[in-house]
C-alpha cells in the first residue's frame, strides 16, 4: 500500500447572480482523491478517512501525523488547523462578507412589512412569554409574519450549553440578539421574550440593528406581584436557597431607562389583559410604519 487515500468530496455550489456560477461555470463532480505517503502517517491513524460528507478534525490525529500533514499538504492542513483554532474559540480570520443579490428592502416588499426586533424584558413571572404569544397571534391575524424567540425555548437548543452565570447570561443574550438580527433582516417581526437582566447586554443587542429597529418593551411589574404568581415555582426555590443567582432575589435586574414601550401591571387592574398589552405594542409598530411594506 503506497499511501493513504482521503476522499474529499465537494458539494456543488450554484449562484443565480449573472456572471457568477451558472451552467457555463459548473465543473463536473470529481471524486477528488488525495494520496498521502504512508510513511508520514502512523499506522494507528490510518483510520482517519473522511466519508462523503465530512472530514474528521485534525484534533483526531496525533502530533507526528499532524506535522506530516502540514508539511506535505499545506493548503489542506491550513484549512483544517484553522477549523481547530475556531473550535478553540480564537477569532476567525480571512473571512469576507458575501453580499446577496436580494436585499432587505426586497424581502420587506414581498412580505408587506418591515423587519424589526421587539425585545420584551422583565422579571420572571412578569408575563413576557404570555404577552409575546398574544402579540404574535394578533399580528398573525393581521397577516403579518412573526417569529418568537423565547428565552427558555432557546436554552433547549442553541444555548443549551450555557448556565445562568453572569458571563453565560451575557453570551445567551448575545446569541439571541444575533439570531433576532437575522430575522429582522429577512423582514420578519422577531419577538424576543427573556429576562435579559443587564442593561449593557440589551444595549449591545440594540446596537446590532439599524436605528429604530430595536423596540424594547419593559414589563413593569413589581417583584411582589411576580413572586405571587410564581408560575414555575422558581421564586420559592430561590427563597429557600435552592437556586443561586436568581434575578430579583440574589441577582439584580436593571430596568430599561429609555425603552420604547412600557407595560405596567400592579396586580390590581384585571382589565390590563395580555391581549390589550399586545395591542399597545401593535399601536407603536403601526405608528412607526413596521406593519406596512
Image: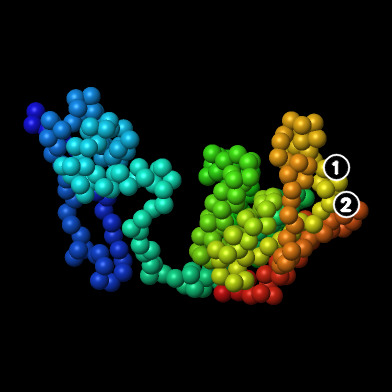
| x, y percent for residue 217 | 71, 61
Q: Which residue is mark 2?
A: 267
**Around disc 2, counting alpha carbons within 10 Å, would you say few (fewer than 14), some (14 to 19), or many (20 or more)?**
some
Q: At numbered mark 1, what does the secondary structure look like: helix, strand or loop?
A: helix
Query: Would you say 135 lies left or right of 292 here?
Result: right
Q: State the image quarter where residue 65 is shown.
A: top left
Between the residue at mark 1 and the residue at mark 2, the CA separation in whole angstroms equals: 10 Å
Q: Would residue 93 be seen by someone viewing this image from the given angle?
A: yes
Query: Would you say 124 lies left or right of 163 here?
Result: right
Q: Residue furthest left?
A: 2
Residue 15 against residue 250 in the figure, above or below = below
At 64% from the left and 57% from the top, the residue drawn is 200
**Around disc 1, counting alpha carbons within 10 Å, would you say few (fewer than 14), some (14 to 19), or many (20 or more)?**
few
Q: Would residue 117 be seen by someone viewing this image from the given angle?
A: no
Q: Which residue is mark 1?
A: 228
Q: Residue furthest right?
A: 268
| x, y percent for residue 191 | 63, 57
| x, y percent for residue 161 | 54, 39
At 83% from the left and 48% from the top, the residue drawn is 223
Amino acid at each position: 500500500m503506497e499511501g493513504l487515500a482521503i476522499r474529499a468530496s465537494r458539494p456543488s455550489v450554484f449562484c443565480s447572480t449573472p456572471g457568477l456560477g451558472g451552467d457555463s461555470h459548473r465543473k463536473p463532480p470529481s471524486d477528488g482523491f488525495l494520496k498521502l505517503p504512508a510513511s508520514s502517517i502512523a499506522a494507528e491513524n490510518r483510520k482517519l478517512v473522511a466519508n462523503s460528507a465530512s472530514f474528521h478534525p485534525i484534533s483526531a490525529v496525533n502530533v507526528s501525523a499532524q506535522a506530516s500533514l502540514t508539511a506535505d499538504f499545506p493548503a489542506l492542513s491550513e484549512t483544517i488547523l484553522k477549523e481547530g483554532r475556531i473550535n478553540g474559540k480564537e477569532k476567525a480570520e480571512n473571512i469576507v462578507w458575501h453580499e446577496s443579490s436580494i436585499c432587505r428592502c426586497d424581502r420587506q416588499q414581498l412580505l408587506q412589512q418591515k423587519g424589526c426586533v421587539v425585545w420584551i424584558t422583565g422579571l420572571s413571572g412578569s408575563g413576557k412569554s404570555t404577552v409575546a404569544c398574544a402579540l404574535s397571534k394578533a399580528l398573525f391575524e393581521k397577516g403579518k409574519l412573526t417569529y418568537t424567540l423565547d428565552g427558555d425555548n432557546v436554552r433547549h437548543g442553541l444555548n443549551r450549553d450555557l448556565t445562568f452565570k453572569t458571563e453565560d447570561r451575557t453570551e445567551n443574550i448575545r446569541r439571541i440578539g444575533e439570531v433576532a438580527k437575522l430575522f429582522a433582516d429577512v423582514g420578519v417581526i422577531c419577538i424576543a421574550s427573556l429576562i435579559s437582566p443587564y442593561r449593557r447586554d440589551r444595549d449591545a443587542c440594540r446596537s446590532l440593528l439599524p436605528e429604530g429597529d430595536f423596540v424594547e418593551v419593559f414589563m413593569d411589574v413589581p417583584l411582589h406581584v411576580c413572586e405571587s404568581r410564581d408560575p414555575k415555582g422558581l421564586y420559592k426555590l430561590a427563597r429557600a436557597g435552592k437556586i443561586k443567582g436568581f434575578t430579583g432575589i440574589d441577582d439584580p435586574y436593571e430596568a430599561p431607562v429609555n425603552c420604547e414601550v412600557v407595560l405596567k401591571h400592579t396586580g390590581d387592574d384585571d382589565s390590563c389583559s395580555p391581549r390589550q398589552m399586545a395591542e399597545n405594542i401593535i399601536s407603536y409598530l403601526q405608528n412607526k410604519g413596521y406593519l406596512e411594506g
